[in-house]
Image: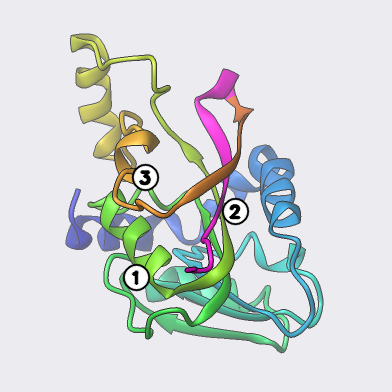
Amino acid sequence: MNNRDNLQLYRLYAPLYDRLMRFWTANSRRKAIALLDLKPGEQLLIPGVGTGLDLPVIPAGVCTTAVDLSSAMLQQAQGKCQETVGFGVMDGQVLAFPDDQFDAVLLNLILSVVPDGQRALEEAWRVLRPGGRMVVFDKFLPDHERSTAFRNLLGSLIRRLGTDPNRHFSDMVRALPDGVIVKDEPALLRGQYRIIVLHKPVPD
């Protein structure tokens, strides 16, 4: 996967994405957002907001910044927004925000999609303020499982559809030496999808 290939796929997916994804991911999205425990006035970042399926669930009064690589996806998202949502075309692997800007970050179904999931996680962590929290809802290869030859072949086919089912979250999170995982639980498909909550500690 690369950004050029993803953009071509997103243009095709944009009109179809809600019908494909809304129903079966809805409960997990709601749970992920509830775990952020957002308060009015807080600054929330959603990298890879896609068509905006998370936006109607964001509590009122939260100042949300929603970015995506695909303008076609953002056009769909803008129809679901509240007044406190700002949109921008941006690569989640290279966020154009200063360090420590946001109180919370929501990473729903992006780390398995971008070319470099670890880089996207690092960037989201960089812009999260100390004391902030991050929630990830995505599919990962369970940590106790290694990729088999069959799974590698299957993964190479699935990647052509714009997502990678063979990434380990444990490999990505090693890049966050100060990250504290406070919750990691199965969400869908017998744990292939997980919801993970991280807190960013305040330096001593």
Q: Amino acid at mark 1?
A: Leu
Queried whether the magenta region covers residue 191, the answer comes back as: yes
Q: Residues within 10 Å of mark 1 (few under 14, many from 20)?
A: many
What number is the disc on residue 69? 1
Nearer the observer, disc 2 or disc 1? 1
Magenta span covers which residues? 189-204
- Indicate which disc, 2 or 1, sits on the residue closer to the N terminus: 2
Q: Is residue 12 magenta?
A: no
Residue 153 percent coordinates (x, y): 20, 19
Q: What amino acid is found at the position of numbered circle 3 in the picture?
A: Val
The quarter of the displayed image where residue 99 is located:
bottom left
Label 2 environment density (alpha carbons within 10 Å; few <14, some 14–19, many ≥20): some
Q: Is residue 22 above or below residue 149?
A: below
Residue bearing mark 3: 173
**On the picture, is 8 further left or further right than 185?**
left
The first of marks 2 and 3 along the sequence is 2
Q: In which quadrant of the rendered view does residue 147 lie?
A: top left
